[in-house]
């Protein structure tokens, strides 16, 4: 049994607010990613986009508003978030249940042609370096020449005398924009799990993995420099940061 439209709307809206606690200037980050994708896809009929770690479809929904002729494939491993996206943002993407970084995960995507862009926001940081390298290699094989990976996430600075400043600037920005007033990650999950309308998808989720904690994936956060090294090792020879606020950045890797 699926999730009702009303329940999906409620929980996606709460998700959008909750995520503002963790992504500094989240909406601006979405806008920058969309700017890059729009530029890369200029003049291309029905561009093909891949949304990695799509959650309930937040980025896909914004991209399809900017590029209404695009075909978006959105992939995630979480059955709760996927069902919310399929219901609330049904027209934004084709949602795929697969775990990024696992062996043969790209087979589930059923793309059929080269990607114009792969995008992600606050999702790839849970991958350890080895799995991230394998993922970057897989994406390099899926992208057309001239396509790109655009990744918006938290990238901790390299250790050094000034390393605390980026985090400080980000925290102060979050205070000014009011992101900290929203419920946190763990509170959202606890409340959603108590909603009878989501009982079936939570049962599926519990079969797959335990309820996440607020620091899930925190041990794998890598710096921009380390991501750039892995991307170059995977075959992306042109890597740059196009936007940054505190430790939140948008990193673009172009395929030759």
Image (cartoon, rainbow, N blue to C red):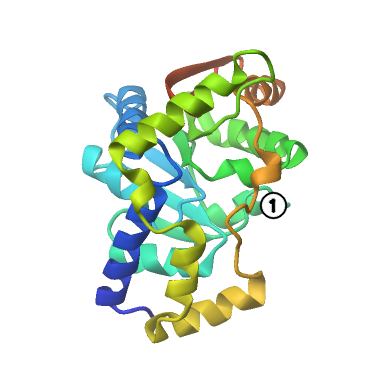
Vertical order, 131 against 167 (above or below): below
Q: Is residue 198 left or right of residue 154?
A: left
Name the residue at 41% across, 40% down: 49
| Element class at badge 1 | loop
Q: Is residue 175 left or right of residue 161?
A: left
Q: Nearer the viewer, residue 164 or 37?
A: 164
Name the residue at 64% across, 53% down: 105
Vertical order, 195 against 17 (above or below): below
Q: Nearer the viewer, residue 174 or 208?
A: 174
The residue tagged 1 is 104
Name the residue at 48% across, 77% down: 193
Q: Is residue 28 left or right of residue 202?
A: left
Which residue is situated farthest in the right direction here? 130
Q: Nearer the viewer, residue 13 or 63?
A: 13
Location of residue 107 in the rendering, given as x and y in whole percent from the top left corner: 61, 53
Name the residue at 53% across, 53% down: 109
Location of residue 162 in the rendering, given as x and y in whole percent from the top left corner: 59, 14
Location of residue 147 in the rendering, given as x and y in whole percent from the top left corner: 47, 26
Q: Name which quarter of the figure residue 78 lies in.
A: bottom right
Number of numbered markers: 1
Q: In this rendering, does residue 127 appear at all?
A: no
Q: Residues within 10 Å of mark 1 (few under 14, many from 20)?
A: few
Location of residue 14 in the rendering, given as x and y in whole percent from the top left corner: 33, 61
Vertical order, 256 against 176 (above or below): above
């Amino acid at each position: 049994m699926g999730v009702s439209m009303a329940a999906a709307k409620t929980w996606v809206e709460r998700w959008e607010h909750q995520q503002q606690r963790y992504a500094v200037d989240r909406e601006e980050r979405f806008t920058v990613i969309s700017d890059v994708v729009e530029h890369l896809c200029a003049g291309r009929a029905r561009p093909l986009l891949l949304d990695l770690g799509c959650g309930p479809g937040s980025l896909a929904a914004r991209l399809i508003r900017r590029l209404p002729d695009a075909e978006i494939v959105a992939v995630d491993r979480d059955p709760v978030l996927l069902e919310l996206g399929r219901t609330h943002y049904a027209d934004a993407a084709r949602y795929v249940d697969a775990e990024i970084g696992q062996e043969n995960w790209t087979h589930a995507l059923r793309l059929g042609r080269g990607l114009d862009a792969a995008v992600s926001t606050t999702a790839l940081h849970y991958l350890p370096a080895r799995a991230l390298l394998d993922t970057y290699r897989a994406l390099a094989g899926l992208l057309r020449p001239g396509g790109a990976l655009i990744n918006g996430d938290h990238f901790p600075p390299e250790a050094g005398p000034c390393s605390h400043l980026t985090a400080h600037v980000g925290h102060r920005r979050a205070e000014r924009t009011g992101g900290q007033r929203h419920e946190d990650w763990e509170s959202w999950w606890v409340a959603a799990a108590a909603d009878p309308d989501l009982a079936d998808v939570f049962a599926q989720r519990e079969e797959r993995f335990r309820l996440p904690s607020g620091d899930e994936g925190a041990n794998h956060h890598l710096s921009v420099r380390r991501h750039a090294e892995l991307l170059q090792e995977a075959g992306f020879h042109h890597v740059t940061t196009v936007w940054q606020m505190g430790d939140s950045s948008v990193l673009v890797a172009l395929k030759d």
